[in-house]
Image (cartoon, rainbow, N blue to C red):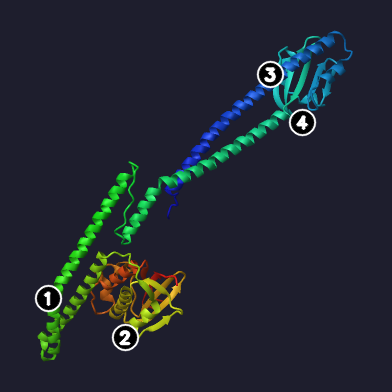
Amino acid sequence: MRVWRLTLRWRVAAAFGLGSLLLTGVLAAVTWNLATGYMLGQREASATRQAEVNVRLVDRSLRSGDAGLEDLLTGLTTGSESSVLLRREQGWLTSGRQIDPEVLPRPLLDLAERGIPARQRLRVERVPVVAVALPVTADGGVYVELFPLSELDRTFRFLSIVLATGVAASGVLGLSLGAWAGRRALRPLTELTAAASRIAGGDLRTRLPDRDDPDLAPLASAFNDTAAALEARVRRDARFASDVSHELRSPLTTMANAAAVLRHRQGELRGTAGRALELLLSEVDRFQATVVDLLEISRDDQQPGDDEGEAVDLGELVRNVVEPRPGAHPELELVAPAPVVQGDRRRLDRAVANLLENADKYGGGAVRVAVLRRGAHARIEVDDAGPGVPEELREQVFERFTRGALAGSRGGGAGSGLGLALVAQHVHRHGGTVRVEDRPGGGAWFVIELPEAER
């Protein structure tokens, strides 16, 4: 089972985003703790000071008598959500927002009864408050004042939304910055990959641009040196093959002429001599075809592949290749209007002819040749009546000098192993692809796809 992984670019982006998220998250947490702690501390200190002032007023009022005590307690309330409670021997007196004294924490009241000022944050009937409990020295009572924290609670909620939004925005910004930085940082790697792909596709003149960056300059220089050495090696090998092929043409011509003379006298030879002559003639023919193919391949290897060529009507080209061939003709399927490609007519002609010869040698002959259009590509299809090509050999058959089990399983003839290699070379030179698959009903199905030219 294949494990899905992020690409390097997105790992860089994720690292930036996560780092930004963690940094701003820590800063937000510190800001929250400092801000809320400071504001709560200030509010509690203010409430305590206010309660101390108020309890002195209550104590003075109790010492001078109970007259006006309720009016005093009413005047001490600071808002609709604040409450003032005074416990005396007669019971509780309340002012402001009416609450049940039983909701007050017992430990808070116990501390005030023992003469110890106390305060506590709590919720009373769903309203956050600071409860300050102070002893009343005049009659041993307890003074309790509840200061609402609703405004402060709304401020905290607003601050939390701002900080959370800031952290999220920072994470998104960090991810975007990481994606941008990753794209720019990996651009040289992308260019290197593209250049290596072009070289693998046969464009040996591909080079990387010179770099001023001291970290990238050695990479570009090493790649260009390697590409230049590879190009020189391929050109040298192609020249060698071309020189050998040219040197072989003279003796091969002599051998072919002598073979032609012997072929006319073949009926005079019997027995072992006749069989030896038949074998010699077939090997001379094969040798001659191999040398011609070698010359074609070496010439293509040495020549640049950027010539524009001409507009080629594929329907006309295929018809001109199929109709002159001896024997039964395959079924022709030509789309109208026929697609036109830009390229070298001779090379395309040779590619189609080689596919037909391959079908004759190994596939019992071609049964169908089609010129079709698929999107922006033109297609040439050649079907044969043979046993097909095993799946493990479908890439190898387009390599040079590859026959192996394929030749032995698809007919008695033995080719040079260069015919399909020439097809692949000519097709790739035109920016196309060639492949082989199984034909429905049996046989091989060769498909050439070429970019269609604009009319």
Residue 71 visible somewhere in the drawing? yes
- Disc number for residue 251: 1
Q: Mark 2 and mark 1: span between their CA atoms?
A: 31 Å
- Disc number for residue 125: 4
The residue that mark 2 highlights is 324
The residue that mark 3 highlights is 45
Place of residue 78 in the rendered image (x, y in percent of width and height, measured from the top left): 79, 23
Q: Between disc 2 and disc 4, whose residue precedes?
A: 4
Q: Between disc 3 and disc 4, whose residue precedes?
A: 3
Residue 400 visible somewhere in the drawing? no
Compared to residue 384, the image places residue 52 above or below, namely: above
How many residues crowd mark 1 within 10 Å: few (<14), some (14–19), many (20+)?
few
- Disc number for residue 297: none
Residue occupying the point 76% across, 31% down: 125
How many residues crowd mark 3 within 10 Å: few (<14), some (14–19), many (20+)?
few
**Camera-side residue: 358 or 92?**
358
Q: Mark 2 and mark 4: span between their CA atoms?
A: 103 Å
Q: Between disc 1 and disc 4, whose residue precedes?
A: 4
Place of residue 20 in the rendered image (x, y in percent of width and height, measured from the top left): 51, 37
Compared to residue 2, the image places residue 96 above or below, namely: above
Q: Which amino acid does label 1 sit on?
A: Pro
Q: Between disc 2 and disc 1, whose residue precedes?
A: 1
Quarter occupied by the N terminus: bottom left
Q: Mark 1 and mark 3: span between their CA atoms?
A: 114 Å
Place of residue 225 in the rendered image (x, y in percent of width and height, measured from the top left): 26, 51
